[in-house]
Image (cartoon, rainbow, N blue to C red):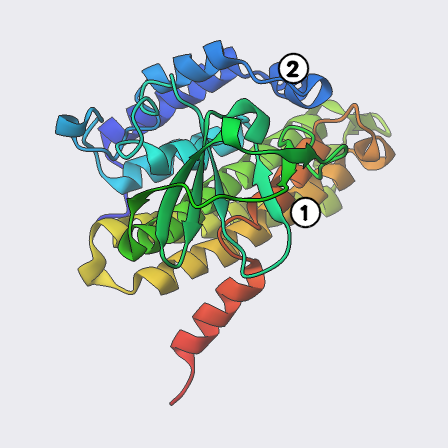
Amino acid sequence: MDLQPTDDQNSLVEMITGFAADRFPIEIVRSYGEQGGFDRSRWSELAALGTFGIAVPEESGGVGLNFIDAVLVHEALGAALVPGPLVAATLAAGVVDGVIDGSVVPCLIDLPPDGPLIVEHFRSADVLLVVSNDGVNLVPCSELNGSDVLHPTDPTTPVTVLASLPAGESVGGPELATAWRQRGSLLASAQLSGNSSGSTSLAVDYAKEREQFGRPIGSFQGLKHLLADSWIRTEVARSSVWAAGVTIDEPEVGSIPRAVAGARLTAARAATENAKTCVQVHGGMGFTWEVDAHLFLKRAWVLETQFGSIDEAADVVAGLYAVR
């Protein structure tokens, strides 16, 4: 097991980071929330890079790399707040035709035991993938009705509550559902890890520019400690996420449930705490809509609920470490 990225992996991350900066600058990300739109041309460009088929075998139309490479890609996407059903597309690639090249946009629901049927990015999608204990089913979005949440937590992540859910067509059994839940959780955690890095960079840049008493506020000891803590949280989260990605590729090295749950705990804490620190560094202005810090915080709140809650992840870790 090697937790040090290779030169090829670093190049892959640099490519995705550069693409996100060029095609998904923060102004474009904001427009997704302000206009409620979805740009299929940008989505297709993202797909053309092989983003969704990173870990899909070449014979199935993918890139043929390992799952850790998909984790690294999602970390870079999370740092740039790239919107859209990224996790759903990565899971569905190689299973649903058209997802790899971006011509088919999927959304996904991890079926709750009770409560409302909440789906993210439903209006932008062509198919809905339903994950349950029995397996994974596919339902065309044209066969479904629902009501949109007017003010979702993250304005760049639209939410729809479905009225009902038909059985749909089976695309996999319980084994696929288990794998998707583990991998989906880790991909969300990878985005959380990237989110924590992105908000820290935003805070550091502002601390270098903003002046008080004739010098940059970043020179003040109190802010130095805050930003150092953010950096440390990001590094811990990144290590946990990478370790979980390697564990999925090499399950003989450890427990996949434990690794995935640990990644969720560290990455979710890093993303939410670092985004709060970013707001704090911006001072009173940090609480306004105009400052991008709130986008990092709201995306973190949404991502930390995907494929299980933080409390559920903590229960997994506690159970596995319990003295028997």
Query: Looking at the image, which residue is at 52% across and 43% down?
Result: 192
Residue lying furthest bottom: 324
Indicate which label's residue lies in the foreground, 1 or 2.
2
Give the residue number, with chain letter if any, for mark 2: 27
Near-viewer residue (210 or 86): 86
Q: Which residue is nearer to you in this view: 118 or 292?
A: 118
Q: Which one is earlier in the sequence, the residue at label 1 or at label 2?
A: 2
Q: Quadrant of residue 102?
A: top left
Compared with 320, 246 (above or below) is above
In this picture, is 249 found above or below 105?
A: below
Q: Amino acid at mark 1?
A: Leu
Q: Position of residue 208 (x, y in %)?
A: 68, 27
Measured from the top left, where is residue 97 in percent x and y?
Answer: 29, 25
Q: CA distance from mark 1 to mark 2?
A: 27 Å
Mark 2 lies on a secondary structure that is: helix
**Cβ–Cβ under 8 Å for marks 1 and 2:** no
The answer to which of 257 and 243 lies nearer the viewer is 257
**SS for callout 1:** helix
Which label was assigned to residue 65?
Answer: none
178 left or right of 65?
Answer: right
> Image check: 108 left or right of 182?
right
- Location of the C terminus by quadrant is bottom left
Residue 95 vertical placement versus 269 (above, below): above
Which residue, given by chain and number where applicable, does mark 1 sit on? 226
Is residue 86 visible from the viewing direction of this image?
yes
Q: Residues within 10 Å of mark 2 (few under 14, many from 20)?
A: few
